[in-house]
Amino acid sequence: MTEPLLRARGLTRRFGGLVAVDSVSVDVAEGEVHGLIGPNGAGKTTLVNMLTGVDRIDDGTVHFAGEETTGLPSHKLAARGIARSFQTSQLFEDEDVLANVMAGRHRHLRYRFPHDVLYTPRTAREERASLVRCAELLAMLRLDDVAHRHVGELSYGRRRLVEIARALATEPRLLVLDEPAAGLSGVDVDLLEGVLRDLSAAAYTILIIEHNIGLVMGICDRVTVLAEGAVLAQGPPAEVRVMPEVITAYLGRSAA
Amino acid sequence: MSTPSTTPASPDTRLDATTDDPQPPSFTAERHLAPKWARWGLPVVLAVAAVALPFVGIDSAQQFLLAYMAIIALLAISLHFLMGIAGLFSLGQAGFFGVGAYVGVVLMDKLGWDGAIALPLVAVAGALVGLLMAVATLRASDLYLALTTLAFGFVGENVVRNIDYLGGAQGLAGFDLYFFGLTLDDPLLIYWIGLGCLIVFMVMITSMRRSRLGRALMAGREGPIAARSIGVDTGRYRFLAFGLSGAFAAVAGSLYTAYAYVLDPSVFGLGLTTTVLTIAIVGGLRSMPGVLVAAVALTWFRSAVDGEAISEYVLLFYAALVVLTLLFLPQGIGGAMSTSFRRLANRKGRS
């Protein structure tokens, strides 16, 4: 079996006496869309925060693209190609949509010191290429008409899309999405699903936390079900959804 | 600056011609990139006017006022960069200013070096103090950050006060300063040097805001967690912001020595910090034009009331001005200016 893009082994995170994530192992293969589901409080966001360097890892190891990345801070993981969106919006509020997305190009701009304070032809050339790419992303996420609007003026759904656009602007090898569809209207969910399908078709690797089961079943190649900090089940969505323990975790004992 | 365009795109400007989306994108790179003259035209005209300003025939007092305005504007721009662009709340600008003033005197007067060599070295010294400040405040933010930076001014003041070589509490007076061989006692020469530095700094800041470095600073200011998630090492950019701001402010300090011809530990004082903070807030922290307008206006006001009875209440007036600004113009003069420009542009666009 080939080495997965992301390999986490025995990840554990404790908050005082509470074990939020308990020895969780997850593999995300190159090119797959991997769903992370589970009831509220199952530790999904904590796990994702550990994988993206936002939260500490108490125990366990993470390998990304064949190298150990356990405990690396998030900016270093981002430089290696892990980008993410956040459950609670983390946009650059005082800036417009374009500036938010352009910021995501950080790691792809090759020019350094004298070029940024003098705005040399080289700067202009690279900025232009970045801008072209951002215009593509904005068009893809139907954000082109609000490119110059402050993100604070946007609807909730479009703010989520800006966050995804910004993450995509980093050209990630692994895109981590923390409940991208939460609070989205039906139309926006459809748009998001289309975007995720496009990304999947373009061989992006995606790890997605999602409560919208329809969305998960529709787009995921494999899912991991977490409950009370531990892995309850792993496998293709069609198999996982009929497992009795999964149904119990979601609906309670009497339903099983 | 560009405004949202309302004209439909012609098919050949479409970036993403492969999709079957019937609507052409309303945002394209081509239309976003404004022609160069639109961006640089007005600033160049204003810069030329500022350089030529002394030729309209002004008396000596007005020449000194111009020189002082340039120095205060330099200091205010250093704070605009640190607070407005990088989002780091500093009360330490007088610390940089004082270090620049004393390093300038030592290099130019005591060692007799020409200002053309000394000024860059003063900038380096200011940058080093800035880096030191970044180290000292590594884990502090907001008010704690402000208070730690405030301490730097006090430290500088007391260090200088106890060094006889630097004149101690009495200070130093009467310098022989040169710039490219010219005696640096002419206020107009100080004005032109200050203006030159100001233009260089403003070009640097403007370029940064449109490029990688400025966006990294913006990201760190607006959301450190999100900034790191896109690969911005926020700690590193903090060092850079303090270093550059320190360099700018130190240059202002060394020009101040030439301007005042005396130098004592009070250059580190809180009065100067309060003045530039007032300028930055009234002008609008994020707005370079706003900060410039406020620097000129408040410096003019201060000199106009000099010697009058109310001059003792200048700081009280500043405090009132800050409160009024925060109440009625939270974005400062700069914010008000850009809002009215946008309205004007919209009206023009519609007619």
Image (cartoon, coloured by chain):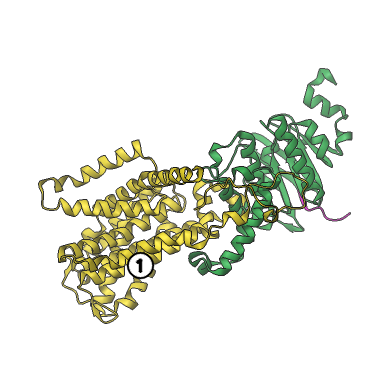
Q: State which chain disc 1 sits on.
A: B
In this view, B309 is above or below B268: above
Rendered colour, chain A: green
Residue A43 locus on image (x, y percent): 69, 36
- Along the horizontal axis of the image, is B143 left or right of B33? left
Can you name the residue that lies furthest to the top here? A254
Res. B249 image quadrant: bottom left
* Residue at 79% across, 22% down: A251
Residue A146 locus on image (x, y percent): 59, 42
Q: Nearer the viewer, residue A141 or B162?
A: A141
Chain letter, yellow: B
Res. B254 image quadrant: bottom left
Range drawn in magenta: A1-8
Q: Which residue is mark 1?
A: B197
Residue A68 locus on image (x, y percent): 72, 57
* Residue at 55% across, 43% down: A149
Q: Main secondary structure of the magenta part?
A: loop
Q: Amino acid at mark 1?
A: Cys
In this view, A52 is above or below B49: above
Q: Is residue A196 visible?
A: yes
- Along the horizontal axis of the image, is A91 left or right of A8? left
Q: Nearer the viewer, residue B118 or A224?
A: B118
Q: Nearer the viewer, residue B191 or A212?
A: B191
- Along the horizontal axis of the image, is B223 left or right of A208? left
- The verdict on residue A4 being magenta is yes
* Residue at 49% across, 60% down: B208
Q: Nearer the viewer, residue A147 or A6?
A: A147
